[in-house]
Image: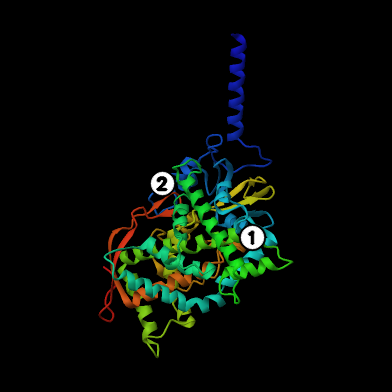
Amino acid sequence: MSALMCIGALIVVIITHWIYRWRNPRCKGKLPPGSMGWPLLGESLQFFAPNSTSDIPPFVKERMKRYGPIFRTSLVGRSVIVSTDPELNYFIFQQEGQMFQSWYPDTFTEIFGKQNVGSLHGFMYKYLKNMVLNLFGPESLKKMLPEVEEAANRNLRRWSNQTTVEMKESTATMIFDLTAKKLISYDSENSSENLRESFVAFIQGLISFPLDIPGTAYHNCLQGRKKAMKMLKEKLEERRENPRKNQTDFFDFVLEELKRKDTILTEGIALDLMFVLLFASFETTSLALTLAMKFLSDHPLVLEKLTEEHEAIIKNRENPTSGLTWQEYKSMTFTFQFIHETVRLANIVPGIFRKSLRDINFKGYTIPAGWAVMVCPPAVHLNPTRYKDPLEFNPWRWQGVEINGATRNFMAFGGGMRFCVGTDFTKVQMAVFLHCLMTKYKWIPIKGGDILRTPGLQFPNGFHIQISEKHEKGQQTAS
């Protein structure tokens, strides 16, 4: 009996010591304040808890009040320093590759692929970034502009013949079809396989608790990835067997790279890159466009100003029916203010992850080597000391402000050397769609529009609108 009591006492001591060590990690300096939560689980459940606020996520806001702008936590088994401090955020982005490197939880790596562009560093990352700029850089976008306009016009025309349109799903399909055509010459109308379907399952579990059990969102997400990757691999093999004379899409470019003797590109990296590009190109942009439509429906003065700008472009043309030019696109001053304000409030990306490469001292705190660091864009974008009435939708706040990259107070597209290479493509998609909508159509909201964050942005009930063609010049476009 006494032996059993001794063993029991020993187990209690071991568990107590383990919990103590978990909650009080070793550090050569002074760790930021915070709680590590329960062993292994950490504070993951609180982090992933759904909320419907447009404010700083409750998980972050509560801890900012309790601990200050820099605090520690544990998410999905990983020790994390959370930064809502603009100076630390800027320092992290500027020290990419020196003191910090891109890092995402193992679950993200499993979802996006072990060789995805976000997990690669140094020369390999720069090499892939240049490959992507070949497709989505400014010179390519100038040539792509007519295709983007044609896609917007075609879809708006079709939607105007429907009773209602759900904006999130409809704009996602429109952008996915255009991007898939540029990447792999995929034509949804003439394809026997529905590539988009695989991404729908993928998206629903992307930012969910990582429980890989049949029936969970995370499991469905992994299955969606597996199906999409299988289709991409089959298409690559098919293209290898039937090569084309001229390079017309990104697959052609990839195949040429793979043939080179001195190439550093592998088939695995190429397929992971294709997968990430397909996902990133449509999901975030469709969320931003849906929120933009909701903002326009709720803010008549913004709608009026935006309509004036786009109708003026038509009026100033020699031929009113000619297509949009690059000069006209670049002249959309208020439109860009509107886009910046939309993505500031959208906060589609709730956290940007990095990993410390060595012990780093900042403002009296130590960030230990190997720890993850999460930069929190919502805390930056909704900071009342930087933005007056931060929750108010006000595109005029960007008047005269030049934004060509990330700043200490604006990081909707990332920051540092990993500033999103698809930023210009996103802005083109949004601006051109708004141009076609403002000049030719009017709409009324029907239902939905509620947001949910888990912690990523979602529209659980969609945003349903009714679109119809304008019949009178200058007619109001929404009510």
Judging depth in this view, the residue of 124 and 369 nearest the camera is 124
Q: Is residue 420 left or right of residue 264?
A: left
Does 455 sit above or below residue 390?
A: above
Does 441 sit above or below residue 81?
A: below
Q: Is residue 90 left or right of residue 320?
A: right
Answer few, some or many: residues within 10 Å of disc 1's Cα (few below 14, many 20 plus, some between 14 and 19): few
Which mark is on residue 50?
2
**Residue occupying the point 45% across, 70% down:** 429
Does 21 sit above or below residue 162?
A: above
Q: Which of label 2 and label 1 is nearer to you?
A: 1
x, y percent for residue 28: 69, 41
Answer few, some or many: residues within 10 Å of disc 2's Cα (few below 14, many 20 plus, some between 14 and 19): some
Which kind of residue does numbered mark 2 sit on? Pro
x, y percent for residue 215: 44, 42
In which quadrant will I find the N terminus? top right
x, y percent for residue 67: 52, 43
Read off the residue under disc 1. Answer: 267
Query: Helix, strand or loop at disc 1?
Result: helix
